[in-house]
Structure formats: C-alpha cells, structure tokens
Amino acid sequence: GENVEQHPSTLSVQEGDSAVIKCTYSDSASNYFPWYKQELGKRPQLIIDIRSNVGEKKDQRIAVTLNKTAKHFSLHITETQPEDSAVYFCAASGGSNYKLTFGKGTLLTVNP
Amino acid sequence: DTAVSQTPKYLVTQMGNDKSIKCEQNLGHDTMYWYKQDSKKFLKIMFSYNNKELIINETVPNRFSPKSPDKAHLNLHINSLELGDSAVYFCASSQVRFGRGTETQYFGPGTRLLVL
C-alpha cells in the first residue's frame, strides 16, 4: 500500500520568513496530493491540493510543488504569520484507491 | 450550515462499556470515512463506505463496527472499550470519481473519546 513520509516533524520560523514542508510517497499510481492544516483542538481543513497533471499550484501565500518522477511534493508558505501556526499534514491518494494516506504531520510554529 | 457533523463532541466512559458515535453530512457526497487520531496526532483511516457499501476496512479490532443507514450517515459503534481506544475520532466525506480516486475530503469536528 501507499506510504507517505513527511519532514520535518517540527518547524519553527520567525514571522515573515518562509516555511517548507516536504513529503515523499511510494505508490506511483497516486495522483491526488492534498495538504491539510489542523489548528489545536480543531478539525483538519484542506488548504491546497494538486493533481499529478500539474507541477505547481499557488494560492496567495501558499504553494505546492509536485515532482512525479522523484515521488515527492512540498508545501511552501511565504511571509508566515502567527496564525499559520498549526499542524500540517500531507496526503496521497489515487486511481481506484479511495483512501487518503496521511503523513505524520509537521508542527509549524511562527514566532512573532 | 454544518457540512459534516458528529455527535457527541466529547465522550468519557469506563473500560468495558459500549458506545456509539454518529456522523452526518449534508454535502451530497457518496463516500464517508472514519479516522482515528491518536495522542501523537497521527491520522489513520479506519473505515470507508461508498453508497452504503464498505470499501475500506483497515486492520481495526472487530470491536469497532461501522454502520451506514444511508449515504448521508455513517455511525461507529465500539464494544468493550479499552484504554487504548482513547483518541479523537474524525468522520469525513468526499465524492469519489471512479478512476480518479477521492476528491477533497471534508472532516467533521471530531469526537474526543476518553476511556477511564
């Protein structure tokens, strides 16, 4: 089955700096890669996703890149703000597999 | 309007008891999921139903039994609760496109289960 590795497990940045979280996946059939943000005590919420026919996608301060050959994808947050502090999860899914396999999460702390 | 809702929000119970968690979605999705999030925040799929049919059944003790009366509802019944069952249980829903896999999954607010 699919295996998703996520790094780093914790990340601390100064407000205004950029943050990058990286994930690798094992199943070459995977074609859908969402990123979720989970604030303390809240539900995971989708912040951005990318499909395998696209190499990069941007939404304001957030971007995701995908390298299908290397089977890795990354989340980039620019101009970080304290409200970006949360746990971020990457996930992978694809083909006839309806399952989302999640990475273990990255705790991002943005220091004011 | 709440898209995916769960009840109860909190559940505190004794070991050995039986309890149920309910989930409802009003998004018109055809697929619903149960996830367990342990103290280390790891999100693990437990079950999934597509149009009331079980399509994902991970390695979960058979004390856990999902039931889907219709495609808008997915309940989770847990028998003989154990200390290790303490976790946050999230329900989610999505629309599945055959050949494309799952679309965006929307999560419920979670049910915090504490077994004493």
Image (cartoon, coloured by chain):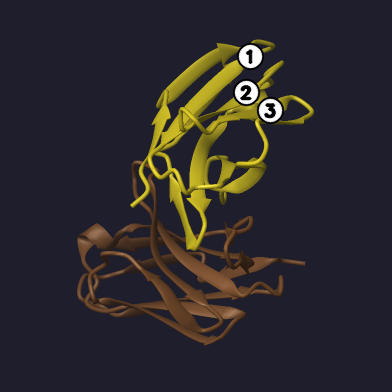
Chain colours: A yellow, B brown
Q: Is residue A55 visible?
A: yes
In the displayed structure image, the side of residue A23 where residue B65 appears, left or right? left
> Could you classify mark 1 by the number of other residues whose Cα lies within 10 Å: few (under 14), some (14-19), or many (20 or more)?
some
Q: What residue appears at the point 63 percent right and 55 percent down from the top-left corner?
A: B104
Give the x, y percent position of residue A41: 52, 47
* Picture disc at residue A18: 1
Quadrant of the image for the C terminus of chain B? Answer: bottom left
Quadrant of the image for the N terminus of chain B? Answer: bottom right
Q: Quadrant of residue B36?
A: bottom left
Look at discs 3 and 1 and give the one toward the viewer: 3
Q: Amino acid at mark 2?
A: His
> Could you classify mark 3 by the number of other residues whose Cα lies within 10 Å: few (under 14), some (14-19), or many (20 or more)?
some
Q: Which residue in the structure is indicated by mark 3?
A: A63
Question: What is the spatial separation of the Cα atoms under label 1 and label 2, in whole angstroms?
Answer: 7 Å
User: Vertically, is A97 above or below A8?
Assistant: below
> Could you classify mark 2 by the number of other residues whose Cα lies within 10 Å: few (under 14), some (14-19), or many (20 or more)?
some
Question: What is the spatial separation of the Cα atoms under label 2 and label 3, in whole angstroms?
Answer: 5 Å
* Same chain? Circles 1 and 2: yes
Q: Are marks 2 and 3 in contact (CB under 8 Å)?
A: yes
Q: Are marks 1 and 2 in contact (CB under 8 Å)?
A: yes
* Same chain? Circles 2 and 3: yes
Q: What residue appears at the point 49 percent right and 30 percent down from the top-left corner?
A: A69
In the displayed structure image, the side of residue A26 where residue B106 appears, left or right? right
Q: What residue appears at the point 64 percent right and 46 percent down from the top-left corner?
A: A46
Look at discs 1 and 2 and give the one toward the viewer: 2
Secondary structure type for disc 1: loop
Q: Which residue in the structure is indicated by mark 2?
A: A76
Q: Earlier in the sequence, mark 1 or mark 2?
A: 1
- Chain bearing mark 3: A
